[in-house]
Image: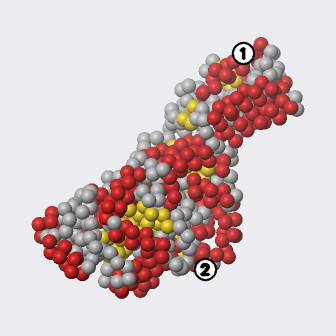
Amino acid sequence: QTGFSGFERRARGYAACDLIAQRDAVAGLLRSLARSGGVVSPAVCPDIVCHREDEGGRWTGGSESSNRRDEDGVRSGDLEVPRSIDQPTATTTDRPAPVPIVHDAGPVGNGGAPGGYPGERRVVIFASVWTHVDGVSRTMKRLAHHLAARPDSSVFVMSPDLAERDFVEAANNERFHVADVPHVPMPGRGEYKMAAPLQARQRHQIETFSPHVVHVAAPDMLGHSAVRWAAENGVCSVCSYHTAYDTYLQYYRVGVLATPLRQMLGGFYSSCDVVATPSYAAAEHLSDMGVPRERMGFFPRGINLTMYSPAQRSLEFRREVMGVGSRSSRDAKSGGFGGWPRRAGGESGDQRERRRSRGDADAGTEDGEVVILWVARIVREKGLGSFAKTITELLAAKAEGSIEGLPPFRVVVAGEGPDLPWLRRQIERFPEVKILGHTGGDRLSRTYAAGDIFFFPSRTELIPNNLIESMASGLAVVTDDVGVNRAIVKDGVTGILVGGTDALPGDVTAYVDALVSLLRDPGKRERMGKAARKSTHGLTWERTFGSLRRSYDRCRPGRPYARHLDPNVPGSKAASELAARDAAYGDDAVGGGGAARDAASTAAAHEEHGMSVSGALLGISAAAAGGGG
């Protein structure tokens, strides 16, 4: 009885351990306990393991017996094992075969679910932006549809921004559910909605759905209440990090609020079981705010390489939508181009003569003009001030003739936002500027492919989807030498990184010089565009969502995401340290020195293979910095 009570005490720390993979260890433990008369010692129990489910995925229990099953254990197949504190004592019941879940050490349960999820993975997504189009809503929609299309998952979206089509889709898909949330429009940004915290109705809906994972997309009131609900109900909370809000304040001249905002963000993300970060730069930013690295998982972004491709390039689109000068009638009727080389046979004779008479350089494009492209929301935190000032100075210098050797070029802006009227006042007076407004779907991919240079001087991005989409479309890019941009753009190979810039535009000479160098050199643009396209290979959405599913499946409420820091995982670094401390105090009931030695050797193997989350983030980011994404 002394040994079994020690086992029971130790079992409190093993509420969700790797059960099935350790069946043999359990059998050996019980045989040793039988031989020792139930007394635990280092010789009997070098490591503590437990078991709560048989191979068929069924709960097992029993009635009173000579071995006191109801008090000391439950039966698993032919084995009698001491029962963990959270095991049921009910009789055997059938349940669906669990979703197989694999991590670095084999199958594992999630959130106390033995051996995996019971039949399907159920995820609730909380997103304050859904119908309104921005990078966050596009990513979360893709995720929801990915989960709903899988036979092992179902998803429930709670958002204040749902449209009628979302409810229609939910009515026709048993794995996709939606529910509205009370809200008010955000002051000054009516396109965004401020959602209220979870009310009784929403709580009842969530409890009826019975999720395994709560996925929160924003640290707003709705997100805070969702994470709190998950903690109160033993459900895993995964918070994806999309926006560095603290970096926005300087653009609105309220930088004094950055410190308290960082404290709030750090507290929120530290309360999540897993923080899904898109890049190592984002992980560094979170770490600076005090978020523990052991809570961080990896949630990169993908790209549809068929949709965003140089093959989408169309001369007709450039002429009719962007206002680029047309070529001969024969070429105009063809309507498209579809890839490299961008020059595609060069200018017509009339175009060449007109260009030479004006003293313009060769544009190196099919229709004699170079398109500098912006695709993003029209808001100041995207570097809009630097963009407007750079374009103004470049076009003014062209008009004055102070910069020689420039080919004909124009500037095309695709996007909408609250600062669009301001941008129109700054640059629309130039005839070379074309503002398209909102662009999405197939039109968006054709817009990217119709450009030649992508100019995006933003310093606040955690994962710039538009930068990746433009590179996949074969454009050379010009952007700031900060944060995640360094992991996406290889300076001088896939684009130009501009350093020494300021958030509020001052001297924009470096931006102008970078654009001029690409305008003057068609060969350089083409080489960078090809390299940029190649660098995006491998950034698939399946890979992205596979990484996130692993975060769902590895997550355990209230415990470190990084298993080497979890003392409840046999063989982890933390377990070895705990066992060593126990041995130092002579506590044989938990395995003593034998456990310390075994756990230490396993921990060393884990470290040798680089299993820490921060190491994985760094490794993936290093690959991206090399141009491979």
Residue toward you, 30 or 1: 30
Query: Residue 111: x percent and y percent?
Result: 62, 42
Q: Which residue is mark 2?
A: 253
Can you name the residue that lies furthest to the left here? 330
Is 567 left, or right, of 403 in this rendering? right
Q: CA distance from mark 1 to mark 2?
A: 70 Å
Is 400 left, or right, of 580 in this rendering? left
Q: Residue at x 19, y 68 (%)?
A: 347
The answer to whether any part of residue 621 appears in the image is yes
Q: Nearer the viewer, mark 1 or mark 2?
A: 2
Query: Residue 63: x percent and y percent?
Result: 69, 24
Can you name the residue that lies furthest to the top here? 35
Q: Is mark 1 in CB contact (under 8 Å) with mark 2?
A: no
> The residue under label 1 is which amino acid type?
Arg
Q: Is residue 144 above or below residue 522?
A: above
Q: Residue at x 38, y 54 (%)?
A: 531
Q: Residue at x 62, y 47 (%)?
A: 614
> The residue under label 2 is which amino acid type?
Arg
Query: Residue 590: x percent and y percent?
Result: 79, 29
The answer to whether any part of residue 185 appears in the image is no
Q: Residues within 10 Å of mark 2 (few under 14, many from 20)?
A: few
Residue toward you, 462 or 484: 484
Q: Residue at x 80, y 26 (%)?
A: 593
Residue toward you, 53 or 465: 465
Disc 2 is placed on an element classified as loop
Quadrant housing residue 288: bottom right
Question: Which of the two discs, 1 and 2, labels the residue nearer the N terminus?
Answer: 1
Q: Which mark is residue 31?
A: 1
Can you name the residue that lies furthest to the right here? 585
Is 119 left, or right, of 283 in this rendering? left
Quadrant housing residue 266: bottom right
